[in-house]
Amino acid sequence: MPNINLKLLHTFLLAAEHESFRKAAEESNRSPSAVSMQVRDLEEQIGVLLFRRTPQKVLLTAEGRILFEQAKRALQEVQSGLDQLTESAQSRSRHIRMACVPTLASGWLPNILATFKVRHPRSQVQLMEISTGPMLELLKRQDVEFGIGPEVPDMGDYEFEPILEDPLVACVPAVFDEGQSSTSFADLVEKPVILLSKTTAVRGLIDETLETLGVRLDVQFEVQAATTALALAASGLGIAIVPRVALVQAGVQQFRVVPISDYVKLRRIGLITTRGPARRPNTEQLISLIRSSLAQLR
């Protein structure tokens, strides 16, 4: 049997449902003669008479009734499949995969996501809290669409859009507070210090500065998350050196925040992406919200 044009089947179904070539023509924006010709073409292709023509209406033959039931069911299944594909595509467009360094993710990001959720209630955000190094691997594998974090060396394969410069500060609990308006690393030599671990970009900047100054600190605690460093400082266990943006998550501070007077290369925080396909509208809207929010922390 030759391949049947779907347009002919659609015209046939309209004529059968209305029992009229004229009404089928009106619904499909064709002339009655065009509808009659398409039905005749279909009959010639399959070799059977599908309608009995009368002056008042057209009626299905037994063969026409068989084709009507089968074709209607088949086209309904096709439409159902198309609807599922559309829903799947829409769901993917609402699903955003992003990564963010823990310092920002736990303190600053929740308010941003809350605002985004109000504006886009059907959106779904998958958030990976991870340091910049592993984040680059996720971006490379396209497991996330974008990342928010500090700039690190050797980012040639990635695009970095700086949004915020984030200086380091010392969080000084009362037991170690001498009332100074600023402090140098040399001032901290004989005091217990709390630093982030060597796996973080912040620690790399601190170690680079200490080596340049020839200063060796008494590091009592090394932690992975800035929240832990702040909590330890609040408990009086030492002076925590953290990026200023971490103070967003400090809550009621039980320490005094003191600027560091030594020159430390500023940590730049921004949007990290790969040179890939264009981002979807929902993703762009979230990125725009992140940009404007981070800019307010300057």
Image (spheres, grey):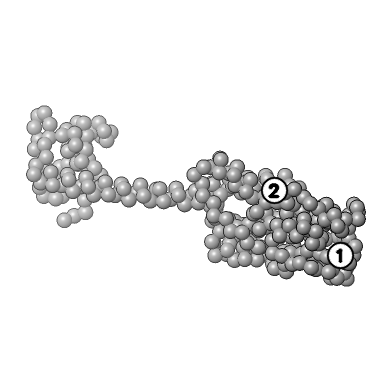
In the picture, the quarter occupied by the N terminus is bottom left
Counting residues from the start of the chain, the first of labels 1 and 2 encountered is: 1
Residue 256, given in percent of the width and then of the height, sits at 83, 52
- Residue 191 circle label: 1
Q: Which mark is residue 294?
A: 2
Tell me residue 176's x, y (percent): 87, 58
Q: Which amino acid does label 2 sit on?
A: Leu
Which label is found at residue 116? none
Displayed quadrant of residue 219: bottom right
- Position of residue 43 relative to residue 273, above or below, is above
* Residue 99, above or below 75: below
**Residue 40, image x and y in percent?**
15, 42
Q: Residues within 10 Å of mark 1 (few under 14, many from 20)?
A: some
Residue 203 visible from this viewpoint: no
Distance from disc 1 to disc 2, alpha carbons, whole Å, reads: 33 Å
Left or right side of 63 for 109: right
Determine contact: label 1, label 2, CB under 8 Å: no
